[in-house]
Amino acid sequence: MSVRENARWMEMLPLLRLEVYGRDGDGRIRIEVQKGVTRAEKGLLTSARTRCAKCGNTIHPFRERKGYRDSLYYASTCQLEDRVACARSAEAIAEYAMVAQDVRRFIDDGNPPGGQLGLVWDTDA
Protein backbone atom coordinates (compact mmCIF):
# COMPACT_ATOMS: atom_id res chain seq x y z
CA MET A 1 0.00 0.00 0.00
CA SER A 2 1.29 3.42 -0.94
CA VAL A 3 1.13 6.37 1.44
CA ARG A 4 -0.98 7.89 -1.34
CA GLU A 5 -3.70 5.36 -0.46
CA ASN A 6 -3.82 6.46 3.18
CA ALA A 7 -7.29 7.77 4.11
CA ARG A 8 -5.67 10.98 5.39
CA TRP A 9 -3.35 11.58 2.41
CA MET A 10 -5.13 14.82 1.46
CA GLU A 11 -4.43 16.14 4.97
CA MET A 12 -0.77 15.16 4.66
CA LEU A 13 -0.19 16.53 1.17
CA PRO A 14 -0.27 20.26 2.07
CA LEU A 15 2.37 19.61 4.74
CA LEU A 16 4.93 18.44 2.19
CA ARG A 17 7.39 20.32 0.04
CA LEU A 18 9.87 19.38 -2.64
CA GLU A 19 13.50 20.38 -2.30
CA VAL A 20 16.26 20.11 -4.84
CA TYR A 21 19.07 18.26 -3.15
CA GLY A 22 22.33 18.97 -4.92
CA ARG A 23 24.89 17.76 -2.40
CA ASP A 24 26.10 15.20 -4.90
CA GLY A 25 25.67 17.58 -7.81
CA ASP A 26 22.90 15.54 -9.38
CA GLY A 27 19.92 17.73 -8.44
CA ARG A 28 17.80 14.98 -6.89
CA ILE A 29 14.44 15.85 -5.38
CA ARG A 30 13.76 15.28 -1.70
CA ILE A 31 10.29 15.21 -0.22
CA GLU A 32 10.43 17.16 3.01
CA VAL A 33 7.88 18.16 5.61
CA GLN A 34 7.22 21.89 5.90
CA LYS A 35 9.03 23.62 8.73
CA GLY A 36 6.79 24.77 11.56
CA VAL A 37 4.14 22.06 11.44
CA THR A 38 2.05 21.82 14.57
CA ARG A 39 2.45 18.99 17.05
CA ALA A 40 -0.82 17.50 15.78
CA GLU A 41 0.35 17.66 12.15
CA LYS A 42 3.68 16.08 13.08
CA GLY A 43 1.77 13.35 14.91
CA LEU A 44 -0.40 12.73 11.85
CA LEU A 45 2.68 12.25 9.69
CA THR A 46 4.87 10.25 12.05
CA SER A 47 2.04 7.89 12.98
CA ALA A 48 1.29 7.06 9.33
CA ARG A 49 2.15 3.53 8.29
CA THR A 50 2.45 2.02 4.86
CA ARG A 51 4.31 -0.77 3.08
CA CYS A 52 7.88 -0.60 1.80
CA ALA A 53 7.71 -0.10 -1.96
CA LYS A 54 10.16 -2.99 -2.47
CA CYS A 55 9.75 -5.70 0.16
CA GLY A 56 6.30 -4.92 1.58
CA ASN A 57 7.37 -4.61 5.22
CA THR A 58 5.35 -2.17 7.30
CA ILE A 59 7.18 1.16 7.59
CA HIS A 60 6.68 4.69 8.89
CA PRO A 61 7.23 6.78 5.73
CA PHE A 62 7.69 10.10 7.55
CA ARG A 63 10.86 10.10 9.60
CA GLU A 64 13.00 12.47 11.60
CA ARG A 65 16.34 13.25 10.04
CA LYS A 66 19.12 12.26 12.40
CA GLY A 67 21.16 15.17 13.68
CA TYR A 68 18.61 17.82 12.69
CA ARG A 69 16.03 19.09 15.10
CA ASP A 70 12.46 19.05 13.81
CA SER A 71 13.44 17.90 10.32
CA LEU A 72 11.05 15.34 8.85
CA TYR A 73 11.27 13.70 5.45
CA TYR A 74 9.43 11.12 3.37
CA ALA A 75 10.86 7.72 2.46
CA SER A 76 9.10 5.01 0.47
CA THR A 77 11.14 2.08 1.78
CA CYS A 78 12.72 0.42 4.79
CA GLN A 79 15.37 2.44 6.57
CA LEU A 80 18.84 2.23 5.04
CA GLU A 81 20.30 0.55 8.11
CA ASP A 82 17.67 -2.17 7.79
CA ARG A 83 17.68 -2.88 4.03
CA VAL A 84 19.83 -0.89 1.65
CA ALA A 85 18.54 -2.87 -1.35
CA CYS A 86 15.01 -1.61 -0.77
CA ALA A 87 16.03 2.05 -0.93
CA ARG A 88 17.99 1.52 -4.14
CA SER A 89 15.25 -0.40 -5.94
CA ALA A 90 13.27 0.54 -9.04
CA GLU A 91 10.09 0.18 -6.98
CA ALA A 92 11.35 2.79 -4.51
CA ILE A 93 12.24 5.21 -7.29
CA ALA A 94 8.81 4.77 -8.90
CA GLU A 95 6.88 5.25 -5.64
CA TYR A 96 8.95 8.29 -4.69
CA ALA A 97 8.31 9.81 -8.12
CA MET A 98 4.53 9.31 -7.74
CA VAL A 99 4.48 11.01 -4.34
CA ALA A 100 6.61 13.87 -5.67
CA GLN A 101 4.23 14.19 -8.61
CA ASP A 102 1.28 14.47 -6.21
CA VAL A 103 3.06 17.24 -4.31
CA ARG A 104 3.95 19.06 -7.54
CA ARG A 105 0.40 18.73 -8.87
CA PHE A 106 -0.99 20.05 -5.58
CA ILE A 107 1.23 23.14 -5.89
CA ASP A 108 0.53 23.59 -9.60
CA ASP A 109 -3.21 23.53 -8.89
CA GLY A 110 -2.73 26.71 -6.85
CA ASN A 111 -2.97 25.20 -3.40
CA PRO A 112 -0.92 26.97 -0.77
CA PRO A 113 1.63 24.79 1.00
CA GLY A 114 1.55 24.32 4.73
CA GLY A 115 -2.02 23.17 5.24
CA GLN A 116 -3.53 25.36 7.94
CA LEU A 117 -0.21 27.11 8.45
CA GLY A 118 -0.09 29.07 5.20
CA LEU A 119 3.69 28.68 5.10
CA VAL A 120 5.85 30.23 2.42
CA TRP A 121 7.23 27.72 -0.08
CA ASP A 122 11.03 27.51 0.16
CA THR A 123 13.26 26.50 -2.74
CA ASP A 124 10.82 23.80 -3.60
CA ALA A 125 10.84 22.25 -7.03
Image (tube, rainbow, N blue to C red):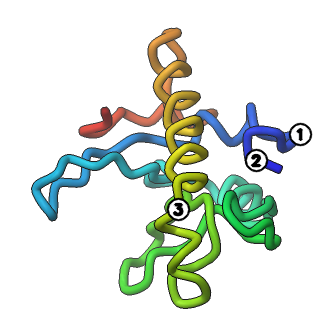
Q: Amino acid at mark 2?
A: Ser
Q: Nearer the viewer, residue 35 or 4?
A: 4
Q: Report the side of 5 relative to 35 (left or right).
A: right
- The tag earlier along the polypeptide, 2 or 3, is 2
Q: Position of residue 91 (x, y in %)?
A: 60, 52
Q: Secondary structure at mark 1?
A: loop
Q: Amino acid at mark 3?
A: Ser
Q: Amino acid at mark 1?
A: Ala
How many marks do you count on the picture?
3
Q: Nearer the viewer, residue 13 or 102?
A: 102
Q: Position of residue 83 (x, y in %)?
A: 59, 83
Mark on residue 7? 1
Q: Position of residue 14 (x, y in %)?
A: 59, 34
Mark on residue 2? 2
* Mark 1 neighbour class, 10 Å CA radius: few under 14, some 14 to 19, many 20 or more: few
* Mark 3 neighbour class, 10 Å CA radius: few under 14, some 14 to 19, many 20 or more: some
Nearest-to-viewer mark from 2 and 3:
3
Q: Residue at x 53, y 43 (%)?
A: 16
For the residues labelled 2 and 3, the Cα–Cα distance comes to 15 Å
Choose top left, top right, bottom left or bottom right for residue 67: bottom left
Q: Nearer the viewer, residue 72 or 120?
A: 72
Q: Report the side of 72 relative to 8 (left or right).
A: left
Locate the C terminus by quadrant: top left
Rendered view: 33 above or below 63: above
Q: Which residue is mark 3?
A: 89
